[in-house]
Image (cartoon, grey):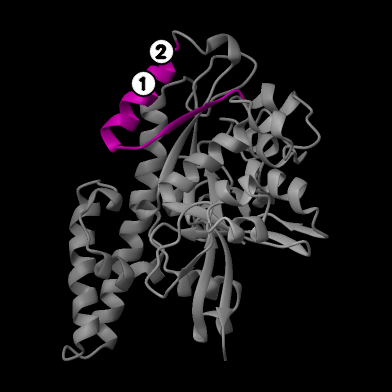
Amino acid sequence: MGFKCGIIGLPNVGKSTIFNAITRANIKTANFPFCTIKPNIGIVSVPDRRMILLETLLKPKNMVYTTIEFIDIAGLIKGASKGEGLGNLFLNNIRTAEAICHVVRCFTDENIIHVEEKINPIEDVSIVNNELILADLSMCDNVIKRLKKNTSSTNKNVTNEISILDKCLVHLLNSNMLSTLYLTEEEKNLISYLNFLTLKPTIYIANIKEKNLTNNYYLHELYEIATKEGLKVITICALDEFNNKLDNYHNMNLLSEEKYCLSRVIEASYSLLNLHTYFTASTKEVHAWTVPVGTTAPQAAGKIHSDFKKGFICAQTISFDDYILYKGEQGAKYAGKMRSEGKNYIIKDGDIIKFLFNV
């Protein structure tokens, strides 16, 4: 499993349609709020042109793509943090996701109702973000009270945690997302178990109609919001893309199509979470592995099996381009393109690696 990405937004903005377009599922969509009650979950293989080239070269018995789990979560309305609508269910489901795709409606259609009776991306984003802030505020306050009540003041770790949470509480009370609060990596790690909603990396998805792609006032407003927040916007014609019945998104022609939403969402998600891919490859199996940028060779080995990390000796490494150019491991090795990397080696995107270990 790669990572989980939650699809959120107001009711009737096209979340489920986008979920269908991304996963090629056919879940229920309807023109009324709360069509999605339970979260819809879809696991998709990450399309990667390099996997196609490796399959063509090696003709392996098995191909294992890295995956992303998408979670289509119930729509959010004002008061969700206090249990309005399906708010509590929504908020519980989203806490399991590593990243958030926030869908915003940027098209007009008299046949599709809007819960606020008018299209206003600024207001729509504000409603969702405010509910996330209020939910985090409630959790933060409750955790601080619990820690102060049940823990000795001499416990240094807990004292540090309370100090961090006090800082978070003040930030949330000022109606700010925690993503805009400076926290050190150590501080983030200490409170990571709380899964604060407003700390999650986020992408805005503008749901538009193809005819409104240019000179779209609503889209312009969303770009202004995203620029202020330092976030990325992806434009998707959700219904058009879902109705485009493509059977196999792994083929290279599809991957070259800029309009295909899965490829663009995945690319943005990888960038957002600072991830990239390395491969293990043989005639038995080609396997893609997703790791954070900056991962060392032993850490990457541990992704496969803990014994690989524990008994790590070296990583026999070939760049993807050299692997293809010299037609596999033996050709690359003969050409002097195979490197023996040690425990301090930082994995590069596209590396093809054979780990040597001894336990």
Label 2 to label 1: alpha-carbon separation: 6 Å
Give the residue pinned by disc 1: 221
* Callout 2: SS: helix
Q: Position of residue 117 (x, y in %)?
A: 49, 22
* Callout 1: SS: helix
| Rendered-image quadrant of the C terminus | bottom right
For badge 1, the amino acid type reads Glu
Give the residue pinned by disc 2: 217
Q: Is residue 29 above or below residue 212?
A: below
Q: Position of residue 78 (x, y in %)?
A: 43, 40
User: How many residues crowd mark 1 within 10 Å: few (<14), some (14–19), many (20+)?
Assistant: some
In this rendering, would 359 be left or right of 116? right
Task: Verify whether residue 227 appears in magenta.
Answer: yes
The residue lying at 45 percent from left, 12 percent from top is 216
From the viewer's side, name the closer residue of 5 and 162: 5
Q: Which residues are magenta?
A: 216-237
Marking on residue 127: none
In this rendering, would 68 be left or right of 344? right
For badge 2, the amino acid type reads Tyr
Displayed quadrant of residue 151: bottom left
Q: Is residue 64 above or below residue 131?
A: below
From the viewer's side, name the closer residue of 293 and 264: 293
